[in-house]
Amino acid sequence: MRQRPSRPRLLQAMLDAFSLPDLRRRILITIGILVIFRFIAHVPLPGVNLQALQDLFEGNALLGMLDLFSGGAMRQFSVAAMGVYPYITASIIMILLVPAIPRLQALSQEGESGRNKINLITHWLTVPLAGLSGYGQLVLLQRAGAVAGANPLPTVTIVISLIAGTIFLVWLGELITEYGIGNGISIIIFGGIVAGLPQLIGEGFLAKENFTGLFVYLVIVLITVVLIVIFTEAHRRIPVQYARSVFRGGRMYRQSGSTHIPMRVNSSGMIPLIFAMSVVLFPGIVASYFAHPDQPGFADTIVRWFNPSTALPVGAFYWVFYFILAVGFTFFYTMVTYQQQDLPGTLQKQGGFIPGIRPGKNTATYLSGVINRITWAGALFLAFVAVMPFLARTFTNVQQIQLSSLGMLIVVGVVLDTMKQLEAQLVMRRYEGFIK
């Protein structure tokens, strides 16, 4: 271990990182690509009415969620307006299709080459999804008067530009993954969310007259961040022993080694919240096309019930439904990913076993019981994070700050993942890490 002056661990780690040429190059590449992303997010498409666009986003929660993934580019209707959202959708679709389609399941078991083929399919699936999403977004903006004209040639040009912007951002994310630090797609989303912090701080100044409520609001946010860190890192260790035979001196000896399987409490990440938010917003978005404020009817009632901005008591329905969906989708997604991993089969093939549990069916039953129990904690945690903005606004009466729980989950998760990768790079080069 190298002797260095006494400094705070994090500061010393950053100095060590920049003192290493290859690690410094990775960090600078990541920062440079993020700068390029922010420039692309401000390249506008033609025929945009900025004031009408601003009014539309203030009254549409679904567009606000999509704007989260585009890093504010959708609010300006730039070339990168779709962000990496179509790629995320394509990835989720492929995760669900792999266990259902035998050919894809066989590809997933072919190692690196099979994963590369699935990744290629995901990229091709991103193109039509980006086209459909871009066209739907364009039609919505044209109906709201935020984008002028509906001629075929400008429409095709804008849709192609939106597809190109999405693919370009995905390419930038993969460059970060290969040559930079962290998961590139997550870093791109992270950069967009962080770029909105000045606006969030400005919203906080608008609520400065309610100082007590603002202070309590900030305390709730800090507690939520701490809980996100705890539940992101929490896992249950399942002890595993491996038996193997070795030849020594012409004789066969049985040797055993022990390790553990870390089963995460929140193994599904942010995906259940994306599913839940999409489902809970969908009825209101569809009903908004048929709503008539001058003659309120059934469609207007649906819009009110499925709108996160509706006042209590009707507004509570949206958040209760969101809470239930978050719990349900957490179990669903966790079970899908658990079945794809096939832990009991992998253990049996590698000669591993859980002490006191017979291999095969008994091991599968035991692991399923464990994952069911710990998923309850992860599901309730995600559900609480989902409704945290509603609880914070209700108890503090601070309505000016529009905080996204999904955005908080993404930011904290990306920071933790990037810090772990940087820690691994430093430890690998015999430098002291900064994560205790």
Image (cartoon, helix red, strand yellow):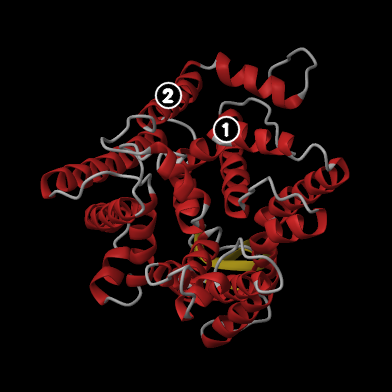
Task: Return the x and y of residue 297 as percentages of the image width and height.
Answer: 47, 79
Q: Which residue is mark 1?
A: 422
Residue 201 visible from this viewpoint: yes
Q: Nearer the viewer, residue 15 or 223?
A: 223
Q: Nearer the viewer, residue 91 or 178?
A: 91
Task: Return the x and y of residue 169 as percentages of the image width and height.
Answer: 34, 39
261 on left or right of 93: right
- Label 2: which secondary element: helix
Task: Return the x and y of residue 345 as percentages of the image width and height.
Answer: 46, 75
Looking at the figure, which quarter contains the N terminus?
Answer: top right
Q: Residue furthest left?
A: 153
Q: Which residue is mark 2?
A: 29
Question: Would you call the spot at circle 1 few (<14 residues within 10 Å), some (14-19), or many (20 or more)?
Answer: many
Give the image quarter of residue 273. bottom right
Mark 2 near mark 1, Cβ–Cβ under 8 Å?
A: no
Q: Nearer the viewer, residue 73 or 108?
A: 73
- Label 1: which secondary element: helix
| Residue type pointed to by label 2 | Ile
* x 35%, y 45%: residue: 146
